[in-house]
Image (spheres, rainbow, N blue to C red):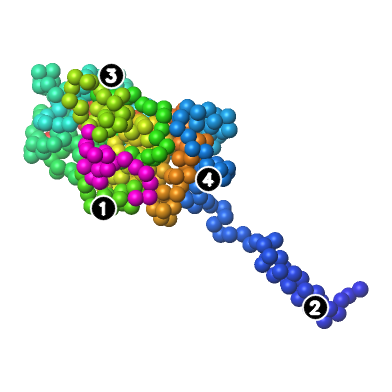
Amino acid sequence: MQLKPLNTFAITLMLSAALIILFFTGFLELPSTNSAVSSAKDSIIYSLSKSDSPEPFKDLFKAFKKWDSEVGCAQFREKHRDLLVNGSKISSLQNVEGEIECGELQMKHVSVLVKGWTWIPDNMDNLYSCRCGLSCLWTKSSVLADKPDALLFETTTPPLLRRNGDPLRAYMELEAGRKKSGYEDIFISYHAKDDVQSTYAGALFHNNRNYRLSSVKNNDTLVYWSSSRCLPQRNQLAKKILSLLPSHSFGKCMNNVGGLNEALSFYPECVKDPNEAPKWWDHLHCAMSHYKFVLAIENTMTESYVTEKLFYALDSGAVPIYFGAPNVWDFVPPHSIIDGTKFSSIEQLASYVKSLANDPVAYAEYHAWRRCGVLGNYGTTRAASLDTLPCRLCEAVSRKNGRHAKAL
């Protein structure tokens, strides 16, 4: 039987009213425009356990054991499966892994002479066996490299002119403001856009350290901070963070432990050699390892400038609280750091850190990348570090044909 128009209108009105009631009582919810994509903040907060009861812990091994039983490497690998399958496909790092076009190399042997005073470690001097059968001599000795194919300058400016038959001029600038000298043939920096990239990861940035790392974490003082270059902007940020978190500050900036060498008083096992006067870098990693977190703030926050401040913390077995390069995740392992810029406030960050410090499973997940072998972009970061620079520079010199390259 066909409904009369009046009855049809009444039924429509009743259905609309019912829908409105269901909506406002929460039974019916319209889809959010953001429901398909979690925010960066959500991706950070998810790592806390669902348990509401705090579980303070000091023993890192016990935290690992608890994580193994509740989560485990299989689940962690599955979560980051794309990184395992595809590896790094990011523009912030050069293509430094795998094969190269061997036909591009014009020389089978290249010698690089490091010129002038430089912080480049002496133990980089070596004869390297590189890809495509290329051999590479890297040395500070003009006796060993009497006819170098390239001269490397780092703290001094290369020669203004290069004539035919002269070595190529390589210039390295790893500081945030990276600027070419204007006289180099090859420019080396931390950025992938330059001729040769050198990241701050790898072993050669921290030679001769005490690597005795503690498995016992301080549960009363959560954060390690050390800075002796007291930049106003960085100090201001650090002061806000450390005012909300129990911390030890060992450097010149905001020192609260009674002096610059107090780390060894706190942790005498970190003395490297009792017969030598201690240097701050001798015990750096060992001291850091006693803390659950290390505050790492770059001098300058700019793209791809990710320095030893972050990698020291990772190497020490602490969790970095990082402020710096906006693309930092292009350089570090998955779920390895706390990116402070992803929190809506310093108070929210501090609250998260405190909660994480009392959650052994969630804390142990920040170490899972190392224990489960899920490096992600970090594999490429290390492959582009100072450790591999000699071969990669020699390859660049070989492509240009070294001292046989025509002068411009």
What's the amino acid at mark 4? Tyr
Q: Out of 97 and 361, give the one closest to the viewer.
A: 361
* Residue pictured at 11% horizontal, 37% vertical: 156
Dot 2 falls on a residue whose secondary structure is helix
Dot 3 falls on a residue whose secondary structure is strand
* Residue pictured at 20% horizontal, 29% vertical: 279
Dot 1 falls on a residue whose secondary structure is helix
Residue 233 numbered mark, or none: 1
Numbered disc in front, either 2 or 3: 2
Mark 1 is surrounded, within 10 Å at the Cα level, by few (under 14), some (14 to 19) or many (20 or more) other residues, namely few
Residue 46 numbered mark, or none: 4
- The residue segment tinted magenta is 243-261
Numbered disc in front, either 2 or 4: 4
Kindly indicate the quadrant of the structure image that contains residue 4. Answer: bottom right
Do tag 3 and tag 1 residues touch (Cβ < 8 Å)?
A: no
What's the amino acid at mark 1? Gln
Is tag 3's residue or tag 1's residue first in the polypeptide sequence? 3
Residue 244 located within the stretch drawn in magenta: yes
Residue at the far bottom in the pictured view? 6
Residue 50 numbered mark, or none: none
Where's the C terminus, which quadrant? Answer: top left
